Each structure stands twice: as structure tokens, then as C-alpha cells.
Amino acid sequence: MRKQFKPLTALLAAAVLTLPSLEVARAEVPQKLSTPIAIPDNVKTTFGTLEFFDGVPTDATVGKLYDNIDRARAVEVFLDNVGALSVYSVIAGNAGIGLSQPNQIAVAEKLLDSHSLYLTGNTSTMYSIGHLDLDKYGPTVVEVPPGMLGMLDDAWMRFVGDFGVVGPDKGKGGKYLVLPPGYAGEVPKGYFVLKAPTFSNWFFMRGSIADGLAPALKNIKDHLKVYPLKLAGQPPATEFVNITGKSYNTVAPSDYSYFEALNNIIQKEPIEALGSESRGLLAAIGIVKGKPFNPDERMKRLLSEAAVIGDATARAALYSPRQKGYFIYPDSDSSWVMGFANKDVFFEVEGARNLDARTSFYFGYTGVTPAMAVTHPGAGSDYGIAFKDAQKKAFDGSKTYRLHLPPNVPVNNFWAVTMYDTQTRSMLQTSQPFPSVGSQSKGFQKNADGSYDVYFAPKAPVGKEGNWLQTVPGKSWFTILRMYGPLEPWINKTWRPSEIELVK
């Protein structure tokens, strides 16, 4: 029996009964589109005039637009990967002085000085620096001496784990086993286990010199060992290279070679180390794992421009931060800032990546660990950084400035002021190879009321030679105040350093 269908008019009539009233329906429909859906035939932009034929870009305009998007994506790739280039450059720089194997460790036996270029290194603790190659050597053991403070970061300088005082060995020393990405083998007992997401990993450890250089060095050389797990039965001897006084570079480039180095990183590391969005940006500029990086002349030009723009943007983020979370005293006109915005080492704000904060840190500093952003009264360290003077002007190396520290500097251990070069973000190279002064400095004068003054100038003010850090006419500089074992008055900000004032 054939099915009977209702007439279409009857169906429509029934449907109308279920609709809102006509007046309500009309009220929900915009009477006028507020956003244009057409583009004029000529549009002026910062990268030239764009021309269209009834919405279709001309050939010349297409070229301008693709140049713009390729350059913009390259700038974003530059800024997103500053941490990776920093790790790469530290490993490459150390390899250049003979530190190419994981069992070869750099040690600043007489402390780090200004001869080598290391991002914001200090002269106050004994550094030991090394790297792991888990692709070549497999699971690797790191035997940590007692009393050390250190961390392990991956190839993008992302935190993997802590060693020493803030690590699971609690400063007693111990054996750590670092496993490569995707490791599925047996994990022996007796180790603190760290799982790395990349093959290349970088570590540095700081040894206290409270009892002198010799005991600190002996502790490192007697106990710090790095070797493949497969050779644990007969580990190769750990070799130490003294880097005090050595002139070499560990700072990333800021030209076309930046992208060549980044391609080397991508080819070595597991692609899973990055998300699809990051891989897409890399692919958009020609960097794809398993494929040659061979940009044409046009793309080389755009990448070279992007490196300059990226470097300049990173400098803006570092030297002129615009987020309130950078400032130690945000409710004043103070120039004092911190390295981690909001003391957040994972660079997030309400679950969103804080891009400027990530770029700023990786461009100016080295090493990521939560321990660097957690202040415990009387323990660890904290930092105040000044890129500008009291008037928010860049420091001029031809002029004289003064920093005043009120009485009773609130530290359990000691404090130090170190000077840096704004170009390299490494220690400023002057006639002072250790450009630091502080509570441990010989000849440093205390004022009658217990306060201190530090002078920054090309020549020492008369009678203030022990309180002086040398500057270079024609160059700028910045400084870091390090507080070792900061106490409550520093933490709660009831004690604070002066702004750095122009004297003359």
C-alpha cells in the first residue's frame, strides 16, 4: 500500500507554528554588516602598497604578501627557538676547546671570568658544565658530588631535572641515570632516574666556594663523573678542562647561520620533541626533519632579515619589558627587574604561553630550573637586574653612576654586583677580568652607617677604587645584584637597593 504524503503547504504551515514570532526573528538578524567583506583596489601598508583587481591581488602584490608572511614566520621561528640555539651554542662553543664528549667537563677552576662569552655568568660560584648525547651513547650516568646545585635541561633548554641540594639527592650527592626519548629497556636500581625528551641535554652545576676554591675544585674532580650506562662496570675517566681565562664564544648567532644551526638541531632531535604547530612554522621556512635545508636566494634574503628583526625583538623584550610581572617593585618607577616574569620558569599566564617572557629569558640568561624562581629565606639565591638607570635611560659607559645599598644587606651568605655587556649579555670585558664587587671583595669599603656604594665609571672615583666597576666609553652595560641566602627583608621588599643614579 502506497504511503500517503502531506502536501508541502501543510508541512510549511506546521513548521511556522514552531518558529518564534516574526518580530523576534527579525530582531535577531543584523540590519547592517559591521565588518567589510570587500577590499579596496589599493591598500597602503608598512611593507608597501597592495593592489587588487576587484579583490584579486596583482602578481606584484602576491609577491609582497608572500615575502611578508615568510619573513614573519621566520621571525616567529627565531623567537620561539632562542633556547634551543643557546643550548646548541654552549655545546658547540665548549666543543671548540676540546669538550666534545659527555665525559669531558668544563670547570672554572679560578671562577668564570670575562674572557669567555657566557650569558650572564657569575664570578661567585665554581661552575662545572657539560652535555649529554643520548643518541650516540644511550642511557647515561651522571654522578653528582655532594653539596652541588645544578640542573639538566633538554635541547630547547626546557627543564628536565635538578641535581644536588634541590634535587632528589638533597645535596648528599648520588648517581643519576638519564634515559633517552622512547627508552623501553630495563632500568637498573640504585639511580635517580631522569627521562629526557631530547637526545642532546645540557647541564651545569655550581659549587660553593665558602671554604675556598681548592676544596670546591677537589670536590668536583673527586666526585663528578659522566659515562654511558653500558660502561658502568668500567667507566671511562672523566676529563676536566679549566675554562678560567679561556677566550671562546657560547652565545648564539643573530644572522642567517641561526637558521642553519636550527636545522642541525631539528635533524638530530626526535620530531616528537615539538608540537605540530611548531613543526608547521619550521616547515613553512624550509626546515623539515629528514629533508635538506636548501633555501633559494629569495628565502635566504628573507631569513637574514628575519634574524636581524628577531634579534632586535628579543633585545626589546629583554631590555624594555612591558609586562608588569617583570618588575620587582611594580608599584613604583623602579628599573629593577627579575629574570623570570612573575617568577614563572615555565613561561605561562593562566595556562597560556607567555611568549615574550620565554624569549626574554632565553636571550639573556642560561639554565632553567624551578629552583631559580623559588626563594627560601636564608637559602639559595635571588637576583635584581638593572638594564636602565633611575631615569629609565640605558647606561652610558662614558658616565659615572652610583648604586647605594642601605645598611644590613639581608643575606645569610653574601651578595655581589656583576657587570655585563649589552651586546653579548656576557661579562663586560675591561681591565677587570672579574667585573664584580661585593661583600666578599677585598678592599671593598663600607660606609660609616653600614651602607655600601658601588660606582660604575670609566675611571674609579678618587678613594673608591675598591668599590668600582669599570665601564667602557661608547658602550652600554647592565648589572645584576645577586643575593645569596636572601633574608626576609629582601623577600618582603622592606629592604631594597637604590636606583642606579647618574652622578656625572
Image: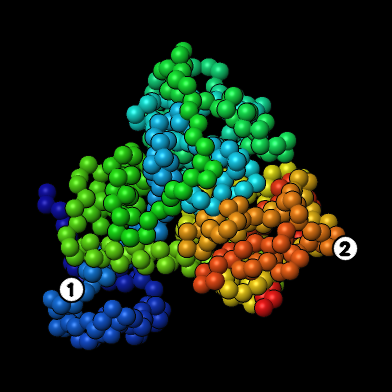
Q: Residue at x 16, y 59 (%)?
A: 296
The answer to whether any part of residue 295 appears in the image is: yes
**Amino acid carrying mark 2 in the image:** Ala
Task: Determine which of the numbered discs, if any, sits on residue 62 in the image.
Answer: 1
| Residue 326 as seen in the image, left or right of residue 266 | right
Task: Determine which of the numbered discs, if any, sits on residue 491 in the image.
Answer: none
x, y (%) of residue 499? 70, 70
The residue identified by callout 2 is: 448
Q: Nearer the viewer, residue 429 or 301?
A: 429
Q: Quadrant of the C terminus?
A: bottom right
| Residue 123 as seen in the image, left or right of residue 368 | right
x, y (%) of residue 159? 51, 42
x, y (%) of residue 124? 65, 46
Q: Residue at x 40, y 81 (%)?
A: 27
Q: Nearer the viewer, residue 133 or 60?
A: 133
Q: Residue at x 44, y 48 (%)?
A: 248
The answer to whether any part of residue 356 appears in the image is: no
